[in-house]
Amino acid sequence: MTRLTTPNSQSPKPGMTLLLTVIAVGIGLAIAPATLAHPSTARINSSPSVTWGTSIAQTPPRGYTPPPPVDRTSSGGTTGGVRGQCSRQSGLPLLALAPSSVEQTFATSRPTLAWFVPEETAYDLVFQLFQGDAAEPLYDVEMTSQAGVMSWTLPADAPELTTGETYRWRVILICNPNRPSLSVIDEAQFVVAVSPVTTATSNDSAIHVNQMVAAGFWYDALALTLSDPNGEQGRSLRLELLQDLAQMEESTNAHRAQNLRSMIDTERY
């Protein structure tokens, strides 16, 4: 198993390895005890070679045709707890920002995965990436949670993911290290595309995002908007993509769709 290492990696906090093992048993997956790596940031740390122009109003991200639904358990639950969040303050659950009912493709072998944390209080959080149906993760990444949208990108010094392979990813919010059953989990899956999308000659990010959406690469479009997390244009495009995601989820998971819309309202103001 390959373990992610970063310049500022450190040993997990006392009891973390045991806690993750207990959580894994609770969801039917055996997670081998291991040292977890700490990324330097939970945000995207690489930016595409595009600029944020002024065409956002003229080129909204529309025209996305999702692939057929897949037969798998919908994400959005917990490892045994009764709520999708650590406290009752936010009213929103931990959310993997990905469709729960369709299998998405990535146009890159170094993907960026994003999720929403509803909690203002910082908790231990673990990101995991699995290949296929493997019980042991390729990566265990321990970090501290931040309220709002967080993300993880496969590092440049890590092996690329395999084209055509299905991967699963999971985020675990550890509400109470002494009570593993209260830890919150959400997960999703994706396939690395056989052929990448042909990108536009324009450097305008709005055009690039729309092109990814039209080609069916929703994940890649979202990652582009996160490359400038504080920029107004990227933020507007990101909210439009999340609105499309909520609409996509409506027919298969109305409760999740509503949570996404509430999350969008939180991110908008």
Image (spheres, grey):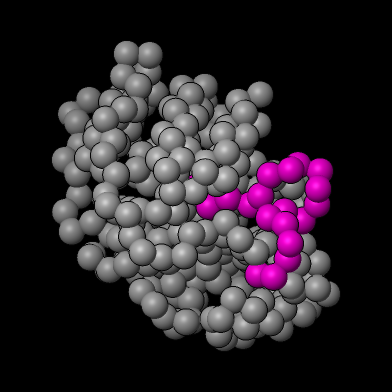
Q: Nearer the viewer, residue 24 or 228?
A: 24
Q: Position of residue 133 (x, y in %)?
A: 39, 77
- Indicate left or right for 217 with 80 as reference: left
Q: Is residue 262 above or below residue 194?
A: above
Q: Position of residue 42 (x, y in %)?
A: 59, 51
- Indicate left or right for 26 with 2 as reference: right
> At 52% across and 68% down in the image, what residue appears?
128
Q: Position of residue 35 (x, y in %)?
A: 62, 79
Membership of 8 in magenta stretch: no
Write the start and end of the magenta stretch as one range: 79-97
Q: Position of residue 53 (x, y in %)?
A: 36, 18
Main structural element of the magenta stretch: helix, strand or loop? loop
Membership of 95 in magenta stretch: yes
Mark yes or no: residue 267 visible.
no
Question: In the picture, which quadrant includes the C terminus?
Answer: top right
Question: In the picture, which quadrant includes the N terminus?
Answer: bottom left
Q: Is residue 109 above or below residue 213?
A: below
Mark yes or no: residue 75 visible.
yes
